Image: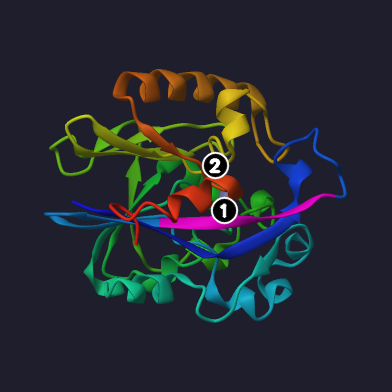
Amino acid sequence: MKVYAMTCGRLRARKNIFIPDADKNLFIETPVPIFIITHPQGNVLFDTGPHTDVFKDAFARWGGLAKAFQPVGNESSGILSQLAKIEIRSGSIRYVINSHLHFDHAGGNEFFTDATFLVSGKELAFAKNPDNEGKGYFQADWNHPLDYQKVDGELDIFGDGKLVIVPMPGHTPGHQILVVRLKEQETIILSGDSVPFKEHYYDFVVSRNNLDNDQVLESVKNLHTLVEAEKAFLIHGHDPDQWEEIKKAPDYYG
Ligand SMILES: [Zn+2]
């Protein structure tokens, strides 16, 4: 089993969206990661990035949100081009996990018509609510005739303990993470937006784009317990500095 980490372009945003104390004039370019895990029983994709069209015209798809999050990339930044780099076809993805259904995590869902989607039932219900449309959620991202299987609580995908979905709500109501047990004492945790930067994990900094900050802090505590018990390598959802390190790790990352 291997884990490939890639980014679907980058998003240019004010740093203080993530780190409230940061200088308000400071902009960063955050990676928008997707992960492919090659389990012997099938390929698994964690998140699908933003839709490829946003690299041509972000306003057409995201409206005002495109001001706060400016895509940096081109037509080869989308999910299908990422998969092509490691010669994986979209039809060979058995399961897609969406950490949550925000614009930068579910934008490529429509390309995986043969996959089963493992998404929190709470997240689907929240995204369906018309009041939330345009507030990080876009029906155009996720509302396609896809095989959505609702996940509630933990889910050991193949029943062998190697890939386990764990709820980690707060950023959104149904946010979930993935524990990847590669080998004995070699665990990676894909944390999505539960701790987008190192500071959110180590310093309990709370970003400004969460739906429930108390729930975020509770989740970060639970994440500490999990990471420490597993001695896991934690991958943050949008940390530009960590991403530079991840790119150097030849064993796991393509
Ligand atoms: Zn995100």
Q: Horizontal and vertical percent for residue 75?
A: 54, 81
For disc 1, the marked residue is: 102
Crowd class of label 2 (few under 14; some 14 to 19; many from 20; radius 10 Å): many
Image-based side of 175 in relation to 61, left or right: left
Residue 94 location, quadrant: bottom left
Q: Which residues are magenta?
A: 26-34
Relative to residue 178, is residue 5 depicted above or below? below
- Residue nearer the viewer, 14 or 245: 245
- Residue nearer the viewer, 103 or 133: 103
Proximity of marks 1 and 2: CB atoms separated by less than 8 Å: yes
Residue 6 location, quadrant: bottom left
Q: Horizontal and vertical percent for residue 228?
A: 37, 20
For disc 2, the marked residue is: 193
Crowd class of label 1 (few under 14; some 14 to 19; many from 20; radius 10 Å): many
Tell me, yes or no, if residue 239 can be seen here: no
Residue 62 location, quadrant: bottom right
Q: Horizontal and vertical percent for residue 145?
A: 38, 68
Disc 1 versus disc 2: distance between alpha carbons?
Answer: 10 Å
Relative to residue 204, is residue 1 depicted above or below? below
Mark 2, secondary structure of its residue: loop
Quadrant containing the C terminus in the rendered view: bottom left
Relative to residue 30, is residue 205 depicted above or below? above
Which mark's residue is nearer the viewer, 1 or 2?
2
**Label 1 CB, ligand 1: below 8 Å?**
yes
**Label 2 CB, ligand 1: below 8 Å?**
yes
Q: Horizontal and vertical percent for residue 156?
A: 22, 37
Q: Amino acid at mark 1?
A: His
Image-based side of 174 in relation to 152, left or right: right
